[in-house]
Structure formats: structure tokens, C-alpha cells
Image (cartoon, rainbow, N blue to C red):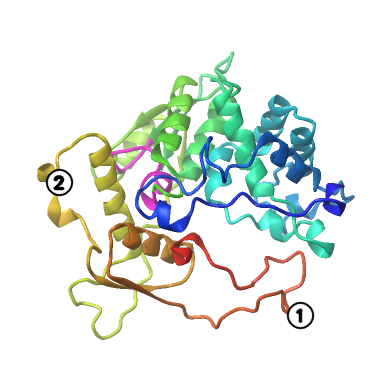
Amino acid sequence: RGFINYERNPEPYRKPLERILDWEELNPVQGDDLKHSAVEQKVQAARCMDCGTPFCQTETGCPVNNLIPEWNNLVFEEQWKDAIDRLHKTNNFPEFTGRVCPAPCEGACVAGLVDNPVTIKNIEYAIVDKAWEEGLIVPRIPTERTGMTVAVVGSGPAGLATADELNQMGHKVTVYERADRIGGLLMYGIPNMKLEKETVDRRVNLLRQEGIEFVVNADIGQNIDINELKSNYDALALCVGSTKPRDLPIPGRELKGVHFAMEFLTKNQKRLLMTKEGKLESQWEKENFITAAGKDVIVIGGGDTGTDCIGTSMRHRCRSVVNFELMPKPPAERAGDNPWPQWPRVYGVDYGHAE
């Protein structure tokens, strides 16, 4: 019940004026003064109040019902191996959620009723990163196979989680992905500063070691017949996302320089990956890259995707950014019609706006 004695102290992102100069992750790395020490991680875990009904892990909080109080306590007890085991009980990829999840669990934290909520997202991130660093996450190869085969279409979070679960049951799983890399939204939709692509590749390589097969450039219905999949596999799981964006059919929509967010973010990520692989700029497909360099940018939409577009434009060295938001400015604290444990609709500054 450390919340009585200790203040909430979330681990901050790297400084805005420093991070806009690169595409590295927002989170501080080991050796950075902003990175929480082992002692501070224990202090923050101690703030978990051992409440009788943990709303953080119910439908008002974590969508995957993470066993949050349990692994908070294990971090406090410095039992990191048990902590990652409990975290993996409900979450296939905590290194993804620990970085990009908006943390509705913290909005539903019981400590938030009387004080500030526990830094649940930071603790989750710390558990899985320490587990990778210390070699606690290793391939779990099924000891027995059922003889059944399953094709999973789509390699985003849903497709990878489905493949992981089915593989651990002993089925032989093959994942088909339309793009040239595995990961779906994780690879091309979420910018590098929120989720390093080496982090995605690390988990995909682990799944591959566990026996899952991956096929890229597989556009079902185009270069692969859906009937072939049906006939070659015992079961078929469709785990595709919606790639049809929400349009604004208004005057001027057809003008040059108006782009959908995912078009902008995906092409930027592809360029970054080509750069990291050492491909010369002369080999880039210039017509397939959208740059905000030196331009006055307007971002329509103030949510997570809008923030990602702001952050990407800043790293392109745009001249200015204006963000249009449909909704009125929210209050600084919960309004009367937004009680705990609902998600707090309050004013905040995300990483892109801070930059």
C-alpha cells in the first residue's frame, strides 16, 4: 500500500528537443538519467493498493484482462521471472502493449479514486524489457503436434496472437501477409519512435523458432486463391485489419498534397527501413514517399494517429504544424458525467503535441 507514502512518478519520455532529431524510441534507454532505477520501479510497484476488486484488469480497464496486481506485487518482491510468466498468461506481446497501449487500466485503477493511479504501463514495459535482457523469454516449442493445419491471414497484432495461441495448442500454423514484412500495423502503421521495428522482428523471430511459418507478399484473392487455402488447411483464420480510411468528401479534397494518415506513415516507415538497411537515397522510389520537409502541415484529427502524423512531420523538419480537432477542449479533471472507472476524458498533451 505504498500509495499512502509514495507519489506517482511515471517514467518520462526522452526530452522533446532531443528526440525530434532522430527516429529512436520515445522511452529512455539504460544509462539515460530519465530511466527509472530498479529502486524506483520497486517504489512505483509498491503503490499498488492490494484492492479487493481490481478494476484495472476488468472490462473497465485492461482489454486482455492482464493480472496487474499480481505482477505489480512480483516486481515489488523483485521476482522478475515470475512477473513475466504472469504477464504472458494473458498477454502474448507485452513489449508491444507496454509501448503503445493508451493504458485504460490506469484510468480504472482504484488508487485513482483517492490519489493518482499506479504507473501500470511503465511496470509492464519494465517487466518485459528485463525479461528479454536477462534471457527469460525463450522459444516454447510444443512437445506434441495435433496433425491439424491452420492458415492465418494477416500478421498484425490479431494475426500474430492467433498464430501464437494455435501453435502452442500443437497445430501447424502458417501466417500469410500481404505486405513485404511481417507485423501489419505493428510494422508499418505505428511509427518507429513509438515502436522500434527491431522489437517487432525480435518477437516474430521467436514465433518462427517456435514453429510458425510466415509467407509475405501474399495478397489473398490476388496472387493466392482463397480456395487453395481452404483445400490445403484444416482451418482458416481471417485476422485482417481495415485498410479503407475514413475520407472527407469536401471541396479541395482532390488537390495535391492531401493524404491519408496511414499512407503518409506507411511510406515514411518504408523509407526508414530502407535507410537502416543501407540502401542509397538514389535507390528510393521518390514517387512513393511523402515528405513534410519545409512545409506548413495541417493534421486533421487529434487522436493517436494524428499525433503520429505530427511527430513524423516534426522529424521531417516541417516549417509548421496545425492540428484540427473536432471535439471541444476537454476539462482538466473528470467531469460529472465521466466518473471513475471510465476512461478519463481529460485534457492531455501527447508526445507529438509536446514536440
The answer to which quarter of the image holds residue 321 is: bottom left
**Residue 126 on the magenta segment:** no
Mark 2, residue position: 284
Q: Position of residue 150 (x, y in %)?
A: 47, 31
Provide the secondary structure element on which disc 2 rests. Answer: loop
The numbered mark at residue 336 is: 1
Residue type (three-letter) at the residue carrying disc 2: Trp
Q: Nearer the viewer, residue 23 or 156?
A: 23
The numbered mark at residue 173 is: none
Q: Residue at x 27, y 37 (%)?
A: 276
Q: Residue furthest front?
A: 33
Residue type (three-letter) at the residue carrying disc 1: Gly
Provide the secondary structure element on which disc 1 rests. Answer: loop
Q: Residue at x 38, y 44 (%)?
A: 187
Q: Residue at x 73, y 54 (%)?
A: 8
Q: Check contact, mark 2 vs mark 1: CB within 8 A.
A: no
Which of the two labelled residues, at mark 2 and mark 1, occupies the earlier sequence position?
2
Q: Residue at x 64, y 72 (%)?
A: 345
Report the predominant secondary structure element of the magenta stretch.
loop
Q: Position of residue 72 (x, y in %)?
A: 75, 40
Quadrant of the image for the C terminus?
bottom left
